Amino acid sequence: MQETENYEICIVDNAKHPLDEGRLLRELEPATRNLIKADYPTAKVTDFICDHHLLKYQLLRVDSLINTDMKQSKKISRRLTKAMQSDDYDIIDVNDTLNKSLTVGQRVSDAVARFGGSWGFIGIFTFVLVAWMVINGMQLFGVKFDPFPFILLNLALSCIAAIQAPIIMMSQNRAADRDRMNSENDYHVNLKSEHELRILHSKLDNLTQNQLPHTLEIQKLEIEILGQIRNELDDIQRVQKSEDEVDKNQ
């Protein structure tokens, strides 16, 4: 009766083993238990497997976890590399594109707008106005081609304003084209960055949800495997000592 209580039959080799040298299937992790059931479909959760044969399935489980994590990591890394090397997002050099498409009229409009918005233009224009009014008002050198109220000056100013306004608008239209291209570039850059961030998030999620739990499970299995190996080494040492004692007695 004592022998029945302390020994169980291993499902693999059908040999009797002490209870402390094996595990019942219900005590194993579901994944390891499924590996055993794959080889022994009729196995029940109350069946027994010795540590020697259990070691094989635990190593298979560790190998399966490592391969799964490596495949998933490689898959995500390939997606990230592909996204970083993707040319689907057209990023253009705005200055180079606009400079290549410049016409003579556009170059002139840019120059006029650039000069018209400078302190140099204000200074020159102020000097011309003051000189015009002083010469005609004070009749310097006997010159009086535009007497007060300077009708010719008003006409000239009106003509300059009428011509300058559309020229500046032409330059502003080019500035609007530049802003539009810059906005498109920003959109494409943001789109690519968002794609890369999503992949990085999926990699981080895989790390926290799968790889870390798998790592903990692997460490647990490794501890169990080391314990089983140590027990087998102890058994071998005991057998060796017993044989040595027998040899000495003989």
Image: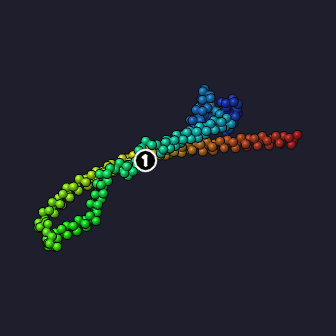
List x then y, in percent, for residue 31. 57, 35
List x then y, in percent, for residue 93. 40, 50
List x then y, in percent, for residue 222. 63, 43
* Residue highlighted by disc 1: 193
* Three-letter amino acid code at the position of disc 1: Ser
Depth check: give the residue in front, 167 or 133: 133
Depth check: give the residue in front, 86 or 26: 86
Depth check: give the residue in front, 152 or 194: 152
For the point 32% across and 50% down, which residue is it?
103
List x then y, in percent, for residue 187. 37, 47
Residue density around tag 1, few if under 14, some if 14–19, many if 20 or more, within 10 Å: some
Depth check: give the residue in front, 139 or 150: 139
Decide if residue 175 is in sight here: no
Residue 249 lies left or right of residue 206; in this view the side is: right
Q: Is mark 1 on a helix, strand or loop?
A: helix
For the point 60% across and 27% down, which residue is it?
41
In the rendered view, would you say 237 is above or below 164? Answer: above
Residue 126 lies left or right of residue 201; in this view the side is: left
Of the 4 image quadrants, the one containing the C terminus is top right
